């Protein structure tokens, strides 16, 4: 049998390299005759304009660079954190393989081995997204949870090298890829913090309609993990999460059924649904629809968008009455025959 070379594209940063290597090692073990190669790109996540976006290995602009490598034929596949996938996927790409999912939960990194209950009041703990901050702040209000921007690499720099924080929250699976399990002091169950959609899962992206790639990677593909991921990504699409919103979700295969739990805000507003494994997309979408019908969800998402409170309402037309006679002002308005007025409260018409 003739060997086949499979070229993977990735970025030259520790996490991207480690997760690609993990997949290549599995491919080599399952399909030893398949030759794999890796093409490295310089990572662009250090750009200032990318620093405000929550991500693990790379941001949206980086993902587009890798997608272009796939479309141009420079590489055939890319290993990505499901957490980092944009919605929708880059044009011309598709998911061809979902390896077995790793630990989906979040972990606390602390060099002294302290768990959260042992930290002093006022301790500063770094988190990578608003979801983790909101969930954990409800359980430990005396601890200061700070959102760190720039992905895992920058967060590790802040914690391990600069010692600017007392601990760091990140997905447990990431600590395994980076080989830093020794400084993991605590792993949080979903009772404390629901994972992000796709957390702990890797995917292999390739060109759309590349059926041969799907067949090549089939020994590595996990149907249960793919079903869980499909439900969580469907949930994310319907929750309009193209920004950092405090939502968590976890799907699990329970015997013949798929169970999925989602929450917003601090995680207290939780809803769980069950359905057929073959209808994973519909189950995830249905959960999102139930959450979005809850008034609590509306408040959670609104508070996330306006953390400092809603901006004060302004009525520019009537502010002008300070400088003119009220009667004259009304007369001038009546002369403007083509001008229409929207008297609805702007909050009533805002999209959520």
Image (cartoon, rainbow, N blue to C red):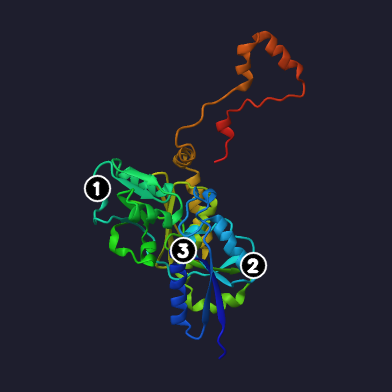
- Who's the residue at 57% across and 83% down the image? 4
* Percent x, y of residue 310: 49, 31
Q: Nearer the viewer, residue 166 or 270?
A: 166
Pair 3/2: label in front:
3
Q: Is residue 174 above or below residue 315?
A: below
- Mark 1 or mark 2, which is nearer the start of the sequence? 2
- In the image, which disc is placed on residue 14? none
Quadrant of residue 344 in the image? top right
From the viewer's perspective, tell me whether residue 289 is left or right of residue 188. right
- In the image, which disc is placed on residue 71? 2
* Percent x, y of residue 3: 55, 87
* Percent x, y of residue 206: 58, 69
Q: Which residue is mark 1?
A: 119
Q: Nearer the viewer, residue 255 or 301?
A: 301
Pair 3/1: label in front:
3
- Mark 2 or mark 3, which is nearer the start of the sequence? 3
Q: Badge 1, how many Cα within 10 Å: few under 14, some, many 20+?
A: some
Q: CA distance from mark 2 to mark 1?
A: 49 Å
Quadrant in which the N terminus is drawn:
bottom right
Q: Which residue is mark 3?
A: 13
- Who's the residue at 47% across and 51% down the image? 54
Quadrant of residue 184 in the image? bottom left
Q: Badge 2, how many Cα within 10 Å: few under 14, some, many 20+?
A: some
Quadrant of residue 146 in the image? top left
Q: Secondary structure at mark 2?
A: helix
Q: CA distance from mark 3 to mark 2?
A: 22 Å
Q: Badge 3, how many Cα within 10 Å: few under 14, some, many 20+?
A: some
Q: Secondary structure at mark 3?
A: loop
């Amino acid at each position: 049998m003739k060997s086949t070379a499979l070229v993977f594209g990735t970025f030259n940063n520790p996490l991207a390299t480690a997760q690609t290597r993990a997949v290549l090692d599995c491919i080599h073990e399952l399909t030893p005759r398949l030759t794999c190669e890796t093409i490295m790109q310089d990572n662009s996540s250090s750009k200032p304009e990318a620093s405000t976006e929550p991500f693990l290995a790379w941001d949206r602009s980086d993902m587009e660079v890798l997608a272009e490598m796939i479309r141009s034929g420079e590489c055939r596949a890319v290993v990505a954190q499901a957490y980092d996938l944009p919605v929708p996927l880059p044009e011309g790409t598709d998911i061809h393989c979902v390896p077995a999912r790793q630990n989906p939960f979040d972990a606390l990194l602390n060099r002294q081995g302290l768990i959260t209950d042992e930290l002093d009041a006022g301790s500063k703990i770094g988190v990578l997204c608003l979801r983790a901050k909101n969930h954990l702040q409800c359980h430990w209000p005396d601890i200061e949870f700070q959102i760190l921007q720039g992905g895992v690499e920058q967060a590790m720099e802040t914690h391990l090298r600069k010692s600017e924080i007392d601990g760091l929250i990140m997905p447990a699976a990431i600590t395994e890829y980076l080989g830093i399990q020794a400084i993991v002091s605590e792993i949080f169950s979903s009772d404390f913090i629901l994972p992000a959609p796709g957390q702990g899962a890797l995917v292999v992206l390739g060109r759309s309609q590349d059926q041969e790639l799907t067949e090549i990677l089939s020994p590595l593909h996990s149907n249960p993990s793919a079903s869980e991921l499909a439900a969580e990504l469907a949930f994310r699409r319907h929750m309009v999460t193209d920004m950092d919103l405090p939502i968590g979700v976890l799907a699990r295969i329970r015997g013949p059924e798929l169970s999925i739990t989602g929450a917003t805000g601090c995680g207290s507003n939780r809803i769980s649904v069950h359905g057929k494994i073959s209808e994973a997309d519909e189950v995830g979408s249905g959960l999102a629809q139930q959450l979005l019908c809850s008034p609590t969800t509306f408040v959670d998402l609104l508070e996330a968008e306006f953390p400092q409170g809603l901006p004060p309402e302004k009525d520019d037309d009537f502010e002008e009455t300070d400088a003119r006679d009220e009667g004259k002002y009304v007369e001038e308005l009546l002369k403007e025959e083509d001008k229409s007025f929207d008297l609805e409260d702007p909050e009533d018409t805002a999209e959520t």
